[in-house]
Amino acid sequence: SAVISQKPSRDICQRGTSLTIQCQVDSQVTMMFWYRQQPGQSLTLIATANQGSEATYESGFVIDKFPISRPNLTFSTLTVSNMSPEDSSIYLCSVRLADLGYEQYFGPGTRLTVT
Amino acid sequence: AQKITQTQPGMFVQEKEAVTLDCTYDTSDQSYGLFWYKQPSSGEMIFLIYQGSYDEQNATEGRYSLNFQKARKSANLVISASQLGDSAMYFCAMREEKTGGFKTIFGAGTRLFVKA
């Protein structure tokens, strides 16, 4: 299995500011994913972040708003830029262990509130 | 187009009874995977069970089993002997191959309430 930590666990931010969320994994992983879960909703994939390449964004998400870094095989960051109240969500990091089967693990999430 | 459909926003079950949570999916791929996750009120996503599209036998993990009907494109989760701790949100998900890797998409979820 994989142990995934996220920082911060929660934050309250003012509109117009930016927040960077960190995701740390205890194993080397090829593929990392960032999801958003808006209040009372399901999970929506924001982007896939592979080490050594640019992140791939899903429809409705753009790099200017959600820049992602993936400097090595155990770490990634997601920045939520120029925040508005609509960005209030839980942001989850997820990984699949390279060559170790199908399971996809999730971090504990970062609960963001924008005022 | 919605690819994962969970038609039950909420379900009630009596403790110690079995419950089935419905999930249907839509894909044109031959190779795909189906998952169920549990999300308690704490917010963490807990992996429960996986079924590959080529697996002929239904997956089982303890009290969880996945009723896979490929022709119907359904992947229902069966929880046997429900416990109070099973009260949570349950998400069905599907992994599809895509250029450069794969992605996993989630259904809207079913909230399960277990009654004592």
Image: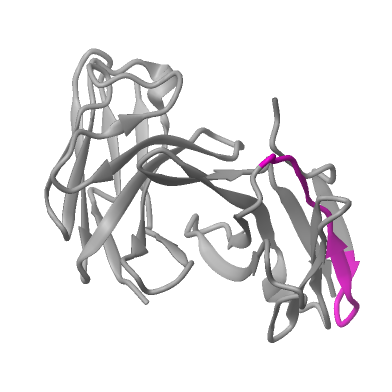
- Front residue of B55/A2: it is B55
Single out the residue that lies furthest toward the front: B30
Vertical placement of residue A77 versus B68, above or below: above
Q: On the image, which quarter does residue A81 sit in? A: top left
Choose top left, top right, bottom left or bottom right for residue A85: top left
Compared with B50, B6 (above or below) is above
Q: Is residue B23 magenta?
A: yes
x then y, percent, for residue B107: 67, 43
Give the answer, above or below, for where A38 lies relative to B35. above
Report the quarter where the N terminus of chain A lies.
Answer: bottom left
Using residue B32 as the reference point, say whether residue A107 is left or right of it.
left
Relative to A99, is A12 above or below?
above
Total of numbered circles in the picture?
0
Residue toward you, B83 or A4:
A4
Task: Answer left or right for B86 relative to B48.
Answer: right
In the rendered image, residue B48, in percent from the top left (x then y), is placed at 60, 70
Magenta span contains residue B14: yes
Q: Which residues are magenta?
A: B13-28
> Quick check: B15 left or right of A31?
right
Q: How is the image coloured?
A: one colour
For the view shown, which residue lies furthest in the bottom direction? B62
**Residue at 90% across, 78% down:** B17
Picture residue at 48% right of the left edge, 67% below the top = A102
**Residue at 25% of width from left, 62% of height from top?**
A29
Residue at horizontal 57 percent and vertical 57 percent from the top: B41
Residue A38, image x, y percentages: 51, 33
- Expressed as whole percent of the image width and height from the top left, the position of residue B20 reads 86, 64
Q: Toward which corner of the image does residue A15 lie, by quadrant? A: top left
The residue closer to the viewer here, B94 or A88, is: B94
Q: Quadrant of the C terminus of chain A?
A: top left
